[in-house]
Image: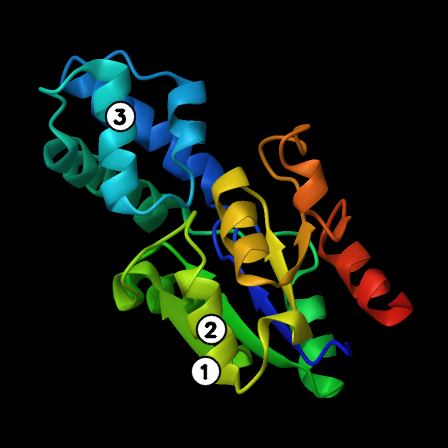
Amino acid sequence: MKIKGVISDMDGVILDTEKLYVRFWCEAANFYGYPMQTHHALSIRSMARVYAIKRLKGYFGDDFDYYAVHDKRIELMDKYIEENGIEPKCGAEELLQFLKENGYKTALATATAPERTKSYLSRLGLYEYFDEIVCASMVKRGKPQPDIYLCAADRLGLKPQECIALEDSPNGIKSASAAGCKTIMVPDLDMPSDEIKPLLYDVAKDLMQVKKIIIQK
């Protein structure tokens, strides 16, 4: 089936912000006395809140105060971004320009809140490239469930099978694959695991390689 659209995750794919989420989840949890380490934070990347709460309570006990840690994480990350800004991932604007110039429909499928998503993308002049933006708060079930990708494809007027999905995290890859998208992993903080490899259409080292894959396919 011909590719007509591209649906992308934001953090770790379009923006180089995934490392900040991991850093500040750990710092916020540590602030409240929970011994969160990098591997704990990595496991909840792109994960919907209801699933993240369950997983973190599994790590740190039923008294884990998700909302306090979450709010502290936002406070710390906002302060950092205000002082240091946000960086795009390599090739982000070039890929988005290519997609627009060649008639591909584009959507964003992100766990980040709508106002924060718009703020981050607008800082870098990338917001207007997307035809549709779907955030986890807009669907019943967030990643790793397929709802967000099904919704994004529907808003584009496309079947999921007509869309390439760009993801960096296992939870996002599971979501896009379950929806039926042709999922390309663009590794950010880790490489594809043996569990994830069968779900992938391809692996791209960066967004410029994604452009080459789309041209070749």
> What residue is rendered at 57% in x and 68% in y?
7
Q: Nearer the viewer, residue 154 or 88?
A: 154
111 on left or right of 208? left
Check the picture and name the quadrant holding the C terminus.
Answer: bottom right
CA gap between label 3 and label 1 equals 32 Å
Q: Are dots 1 and 2 in contact, CB under 8 Å?
A: yes
For label 2, count other residues whose C-alpha is less than 10 Å away and answer few (under 14), some (14-19) or many (20+). many
Kindly identify the amino acid type of the residue bearing the numbered disc 1. Answer: Arg
What residue is shown with label 1?
A: 155
62 on left or right of 158? left
Kindly identify the amino acid type of the residue bearing the numbered disc 2. Answer: Ala
CA gap between label 1 and label 2 equals 5 Å
> What residue is rendered at 45% in x and 20% in y?
39
What residue is shown with label 2?
A: 152
What residue is shown with label 3?
A: 56
Q: Is residue 14 visible?
A: no
> What residue is rendered at 16% in x and 32% in y?
66
- Is tag 3's residue or tag 1's residue first in the polypeptide sequence? 3
Q: Is residue 23 above or below residue 151?
A: above
Q: Are dots 3 and 1 in contact, CB under 8 Å?
A: no
